[in-house]
């Protein structure tokens, strides 16, 4: 190994609507300490890690206080988010010398809600990402058996784009790893991956909350819970492995999983994927778990300089459709 | 099934450098007739189907005649390519009422060489595609154990972009399927898939010739033939399944496979993939074979209107990097 790094996908199990934040933070801190004790240098936590995945609930006007409490606000100087407990978590990461990626619901200083992840190193936010591809709807679904996914109601699309950055705390000699972050549904969209690939990204960090039972999204109404879970994990792995391969990057992807409130199942699928698209480590449980792998960042070089040497092979003159409009225009029907 | 279609990936086995074209054409015609006898309405043949995959050879100046004979030129009226034998093949497809996609080396009327596929229906070329992503090199490689891949020498990058089109011969009531074509290495590039996705494509047709042994592209120098073949097929399936899923399209993908000249192995992997990324039919042999599946084009609707409803979820304001330059620009190193 010429540029070794020990990394972890930190999987976080069941968190209920009424689980106290202090309890969640205690679990996250224990996972962080476990990672540190194993020599992990970079630990990636899931999406919306500090609370349950609240976009599944409809909040009535009288529940506004509960809804608001799910969001964090950042400290004006460090950029570190929120409440006292959350602050203590980042301080502990700093003490332990572990770089962390953590997802959380954010209210910006202007009050705009985002689904956010921060890369925190040595007690400072090195980079922040706000989820671009919000799935779901802005109105509750009418089917009483379907789980709501109200991200379009509770968040706005990220306004920071896909900004790769260097992680100097993980530097080898003169070269710091190039890191990118996305969140959950973003992983299904090749555009975000490619924007990071175009910046030479070597480690993608992606936390997620993915509903196990969503037959109307990827199956038929008569799909069982088991069938739906298998399909959801199949799609998750497929897009992460394929896009890691075609952008010659490692990916650390971490699940918030388990049966929240005892009735809303989220898939597992925490894993570390290499630049050839192979899974090098993955979760063994459906609860709190630290998935560790030793990776060599120089394993990205072969792909980036041969099969996927963008400079030699890409033809941007034919890619205009991708950035010039959002939606589909079908060719005209013919006689 | 509300919009049923019977389709075939037509796999074509070993063809040597000196295999007479009349012999290849007889095999292709037999495969076409087998497909027709099984009720196939659309048959997709591989890349550079009429000859061996000649970009693996270095041709000396004295071999210019042999090199030139690998290319087809199109008929000025029908758009149908080339030699008498090739013409007979398309006439037979017309008699049998089968729409075909066939790949071949093309010299344009201006003499420019392209790696081309044509969609031929009822004796006419309905659409033509010229491979955009040419892999390999324009100079022979120095390693005597490596197989040359001189596509950048023998072809120019396609100048037609990614143009989806309607196939009226396969129409159901008022709606003709929307079809797209790519060739071989194109399937590894999400950009082409997405350009077709942006046009509502329901069937991607992709022929390929993929070297089984290329350790310097995706492995290490000590990789065995078996290991390399397994890796090549893994990558092939990964990108086809993932991009079919994330563009909610069927894909028919056909291999030129086998041990050309008894020493250059090409992978198999002919298959039909559905819009959820699942393989619904695939090759059982490593030779000439018709892989048939009954598909329902309306299976594309769920993905196109929910998870991958582009109008609702895409954010083109953040995709500029993809179309504004070819290559990588890394973030600056930090102290």
Image: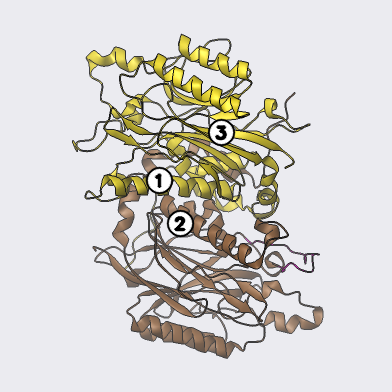
Chain colours: A yellow, B brown
Which dot marks residue B241? 2
Question: In percent of the image, x 36 and y 33: which residue is there?
Answer: A258
- Of B53 and A298, nearer the camera is A298
Residue, disc 1: A233
Q: Is residue B116 a member of the stretch shown in magenta? A: no
Query: In the image, which residues are magenta?
Result: B134-148
Quadrant of res B143: bottom right
Q: Position of residue B332 (x, y in %)?
A: 71, 31
Dot 2 falls on a residue whose secondary structure is: helix
Of B182 and A50, nearer the camera is: A50
B202 lies left or right of B269: left
In this rendering, which labeled residue sits more in front, label 1 or label 2? 1
Disc sitting over residue A8 in the figure: 3
Q: State how far apart marks 3 and 1 are (Cα).
A: 19 Å
Residue at horizontal 45 percent and vertical 43 percent from the top: A188
* Nearer the observer, B334 or A254: A254
Q: Is residue B223 visible?
A: yes
Q: Please name whichever residue, B286 or B254, is drawn nearer the observer in this view of the structure.
A: B286
């Amino acid at each position: 190994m010429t540029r070794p790094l020990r990394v972890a996908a930190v999987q976080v199990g069941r968190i209920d609507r009424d689980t106290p934040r202090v309890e969640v933070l205690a679990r996250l801190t224990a996972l962080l300490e476990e990672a540190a004790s194993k020599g992990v240098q970079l630990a990636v936590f899931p999406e919306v890690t500090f609370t349950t995945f609240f976009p599944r609930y409809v909040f009535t006007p009288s529940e506004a206080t509960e809804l608001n409490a799910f969001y964090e606000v950042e400290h004006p100087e460090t950029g570190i988010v929120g409440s006292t407990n959350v602050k203590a978590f980042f301080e502990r990461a700093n003490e332990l010398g572990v770089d962390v990626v953590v997802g959380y619901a954010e209210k910006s200083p202007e009050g705009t809600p985002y689904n956010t992840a921060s890369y925190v190193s040595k007690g400072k936010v090195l980079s922040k990402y706000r989820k671009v591809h919000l799935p779901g709807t802005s109105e509750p679904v009418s089917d009483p058996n379907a789980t709501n996914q109200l991200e379009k109601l509770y968040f706005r699309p990220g306004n920071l784009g896909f900004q790769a950055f260097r992680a100097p705390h993980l530097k080898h000699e003169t070269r710091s790893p190039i890191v990118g972050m996305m969140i959950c549904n973003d992983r299904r969209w090749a555009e975000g991956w490619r924007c990071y690939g175009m910046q030479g990204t070597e480690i993608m960090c992606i936390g997620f909350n993915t509903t196990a039972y969503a037959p109307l999204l990827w199956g038929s109404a008569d799909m069982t819970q088991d069938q739906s879970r298998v399909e959801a994990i199949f799609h998750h792995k497929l897009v992460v492995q394929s896009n890691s391969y075609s952008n010659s990057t490692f990916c650390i992807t971490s699940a918030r999983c388990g049966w929240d409130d005892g009735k809303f199942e989220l898939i597992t699928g925490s894993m570390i994927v290499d630049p050839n698209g192979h899974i090098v480590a993955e979760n063994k449980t459906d609860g709190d778990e630290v998935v560790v792998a030793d990776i060599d960042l120089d394993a990205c070089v072969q792909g980036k300089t041969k099969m996927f040497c963008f400079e030699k092979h890409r033809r941007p003159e034919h890619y205009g459709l991708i950035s010039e409009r959002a939606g589909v225009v079908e060719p005209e029907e013919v006689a």
